[in-house]
Image (tube, helix red, strand yellow):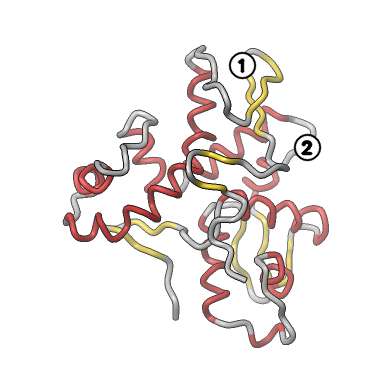
Amino acid sequence: VVKMLTIGKYQYPNQVTFAEALRITKTAITDFDGKIPNKDVAEALGYKIKNPNAISGYIFRKFDDVCAYNLMKRQRGHLKTTALAEKALDPYDPRKAQGGITEAIREMAIVGLAFTQWNAEIPPETAFPSKLTGLLGISWQEAQRHSESLRKLFIEVFPYLKSVSEQTLGMPPETGRDVHLKETTTVALDITQPRVIGELRTEDYGIIK
């Protein structure tokens, strides 16, 4: 069985981005009434499936990554959307949707911990391993093994959380971020378009065809 990456006592996704998970979740809600068959999940991840009963363990490993973002849960033969997914993809209430996205991301324990302890800032690449050792109480060897993949995760998801924090504090959002203001206290993220944050193009990272 191929297992999700674990650092210290925390698991985290590295094969599927949050943007991909959100896209698959939206498909599940709009096309499958919240229950998307395994075959369709695999095909949404870029695989051609001839036999739904012979999906490889490696592909199921990616299913776990999809579910790690707290928008879906694995069940027999399909993935089912969560209550947070319904909230995060509400098409009529941008504030509710933003709240759902934020909750889903914060429920990834390692993300919530790092965001809080690091005051919403991602350490530079050279300092990242040492910051991880201090945050998690792990060896520098373990920190180095996970630094690249974990930093990519933080680069993608921190801006979602940071935009909300800035609006709560009355601070203007950073220029160039893919957000637009609906009201003075509401931030809505355009989740329908590819987003480029730093060195990571979140639409493409992690897809293996």
Q: In which quarter of the image is residue 130?
A: top left
Whether residue 126 sits left or right of residue 207 in the image: it is left
Kindly report the distance in space between the C-alpha atoms of the residues bearing marks 1 and 2.
18 Å
| Residue found 41% across the figure and 44% down from its top | 111
Q: In which quarter of the image is residue 39?
A: bottom right
* The disc label shown at residue 147, or none: none
**Disc 1: which residue:** 185
Whether residue 49 sits left or right of residue 56 in the image: it is right
Whether residue 175 sits left or right of residue 34 in the image: it is left
Q: Which quadrant of the rendered structure holds the N terminus?
A: bottom left
- Going from N to C along the chain, the mark reached first, 1 or 2, is 2
| Residue found 19% across the figure and 43% down from its top | 134
Question: Which secondary structure lies at badge 2?
Answer: loop
**Disc 2: which residue:** 91
Question: Which amino acid, by three-letter code, is at mark 2?
Answer: Pro
Q: Quadrant of residue 89?
A: top right
| Residue found 63% across the figure and 24% down from its top | 187
